[in-house]
Amino acid sequence: MEIVLAIMIGILYAAGIYMILRRSLVKLILGIIILGNGANLLIFLLGRITKGSPPIIPGDLKVFEAAYADPIPQALILTAIVISFGLQSFAIILIKRAYKVVKTDDLDEMNAIDQDS
Amino acid sequence: MLIAILLGFLFSLLLVFTGKFFKGKPGIISAAIPLVLFGYFLQFIPEISAGGTIVHSYSWVPSFGVNLDFTLDGLSLLFSLMITGIGFLVFVYTAAYLKNHKYLDRFYGYLSMFMAAMLGLVLSDNLITLFVFWELTSISSFFLIGFNNSNPESRKSAITALAITGLGGLSLLAGALVLGSVGGSYSIDELMNSSGEIAASPYYILIAILIFGAAFTKSAQFPFHFWLPGAMKAPTPVSTYLHSATMVKAGIYLLMRMTPVLGNQEFWNSTLIIVGSITMVYAAIHTLFRTDLKGILAYSTISALGILVFLIGQGTEAALLAAAVFIVVHALYKATLFLVTGIIDHQTLSRDVTILRGLRKVMLPVAIAGFLAAISSAGIPPTIGFLGKELTYESTLALVGTPLLWIALILITKILLLHAGFVAGISPFIGQLPERFEKTKKPGILLWGPPIILSVAGIVFGVFPGIIEGSLIKPVVAAMGQDAGDQHLQLWHGFNTVLWLSVATIVIGTVLYFTIKPSQKLVKMVTRVEYISPESIISGFWSLFNKFSSLWTRIFQNGYLRNYVSTILVFLIGLTGYVLYNTANFSMDFSTLSEITVYEIVVVTILLIAVFFVVFTRSRLAAVASMGVMGLAICLIFVFYSAPDLAMTQFSIDTLTVILFVLVLYRLPRYLKLSDYKTRIRDGVLALSFGSIITILILEVLAQPVNMEISEYYAQNAYLLAHGKNVVNVILVDFRGSDTFMEISVLAIAAIGVFGLLKLRLKKTDQR
């Protein structure tokens, strides 16, 4: 399964990069989101995957007795998801405002406007 | 001693506030500073000549081994006295030369800043401190050369000088760092003790080249010499002070300082001899082709610096003695000639030797100074110049190898320098006074006093060499690790080869003076071959470099995000791909992998379809919806692999993002395909290769064993220490609580930003 996931992550990265290379601002953001998801999964997979044993200590025990999934990558990814939401929401609003001002979402045209002023 | 060095800096700072006061007559008061310093350094003579050194140490950046260590030994003392002594005369002279000049206060500020930097340079025992002062001299020299800042030529010369000497400064820093790490210390004094190790180290050649780079640029050695004639655009006091007596000697000082550390090696000696001899002959020949007095003096200065480098390169005790004497000789006569030239320029507004004649009738004291300096430069007894020349011949005769060649070169140089000295110091004063100069005003004592003092000193030291021998010259040789022993400076050595060489120099030089007269014709001859001079070659390089950098900027800094991203990606793919190709073994232990189940495959397929849709759909809404699907698929993957917290977070965030997108973006223009087919293919290839690299990387990492130590610590202690059973939550809110707090702050800032953007109401004029 790891190999399938590795290929999937590669595809996510490729899709993200491809979208970032587009001229449309909206696509740029979608690209960043895809790339972010790919990165999260990358960390997740590199922490090794374990089925059916979440890192939660069973009810009456004080320490783990059976195998458990690595909690550190999960903590890292949780942080990453939340932070990337902050980035996304800010970027989305920024696009909206930028569009209101310059009436385009084409990065190249925005460049041209920047140079005029 | 720190105060002595800082005095100049403090004074220039003071001028910022009291500039107006010093602009008028009181300007001459500022000359008190170099005079006081001169006196201060004079009092050390007895102690230094007795073989002592004076060390003052102040801690500056001890953690990097950088201290303000100031050492006064024979070498430093000679330079300090020259800097302050000639400094004093130049300060006095300036008061008259730039009388009522608009920016006289600035001039004094730069000049005293330069003096302080120069003192710091020759007194520093620490290589890094030395570098700092070295750069300060370059910078103050930049301001002084560009002093007439309304003249474009003058600005250009200033920039050329700064570029060349600044380049040398970088070379000095690099050399100092390598030297420091090889020798284990930045203190020159300590480095002298480890000179054996340094010479044996594989970096010796590198260090020597870097130090040469610094010294040759500063002291205008071929092929870096051309900034010096350009620097003659500066007012004459500057040319006197910086470009003949002191700053250009900083490179000489560095070489002398480094002689005990790096010297006595084949590479060191032969490079210096070769570069020095090329410079001295090349520049001496150039003096024939100049009609501008300052141009002649500039090239004869370069030639003299070449002689000094040549002598240091010989490295013998006799040669170093000759170098020490020649520094004094040259400072005295060249400063005089510059000052004389300045007076002529100031009074007659001309520096053209082809028209200046008979000026003795209007400025007799100046003519005397010029004459004395010229015979000192010619090395005619009883001047100190004669001593310097004799010693030079003597040490060159003792050279092993091919002394005949070197003798011939130095003879040619000396003859041409004699010619140059006569042209600059004598020819403007003899002959018939042209009508146009008859009304020339007589210069004041402030102008002719300094050159008279300097030129008379040249005679006095020549007649009584004992005055400077024990007190100044021998300590210099001692500071370079050689013992001058019982050699005595004297005018009469008996009838020997050296004497005959001297006679030959004087006779041939005088004949040359009467046969070759400077003329426009000769100037034209040299401009014809200008295109192969180092100056034109280097300026050609510069314009090439400019073109190259603008091309570079246009390609890499073009303001398009996708180009930056592509550049970074291509580089990353290339580099990572290369490393992977060389090191990866592509072997995997399939038994450790988890098995593939149907529902996992279904989820992965859904995810891939969603990604495909996001990328290729023409509808923005479809793209956003597919993105939501993709998020949910990832959410399911988290569920499969024991990460319930992640699944929950991913689910809520994904939903929020989709809602936000839909709310905000439905008003945007149509979702166009802006790129053409070719671009899309190119980007696709780039993206896919990057994706493949990532996949290969993951597989490589998965083949490595995993370290669970930290995870185990958290898992074992989650309940025992933090009393929580969900380990992920415990890590976030307890073990790494402050990180989470920071994260919340980031989110809060983003939220404030979003709120601000939403509330922003633009004025009509800001909208387009």
Image (spheres, coloured by chain):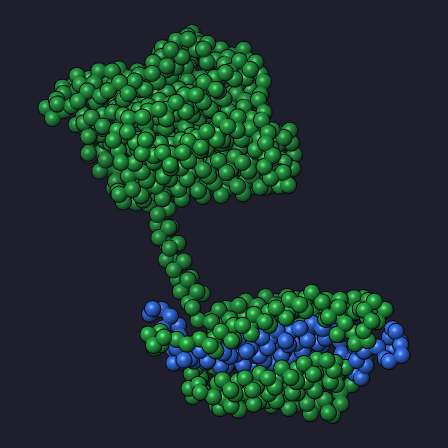
> Horizontal and vertical percent for residue B417?
33, 24
- Seen in the picture, residue B70 relative to B322 is either above or below; the reply is below
- Seen in the picture, residue B662 relative to A22 is either above or below; the reply is below
Q: Residue at x 48, y 13 (%)?
A: B469
> Horizontal and vertical percent for residue B692?
62, 77
Q: Quadrant of the C terminus of chain B?
A: bottom left
> Horizontal and vertical percent for residue B290?
26, 32
Determine whether, in the image, residue B247 is placed left or right of residue A54: left
On the image, which quarter does residue B607 sit in? bottom right
Q: Residue at x 17, y 16 (%)?
A: B361
On the image, which quarter does residue B237 sit in? top left
> Horizontal and vertical percent for residue B634?
66, 84
- Seen in the picture, residue B666 relative to B517 is either above or below; the reply is below
Q: Residue at x 61, y 81 (%)?
A: A12
What is the letter of the green chain? B
What is the letter of the blue chain? A
On the image, which quarter does residue B58 sit in? top right
Q: Residue at x 65, y 90 (%)?
A: B605
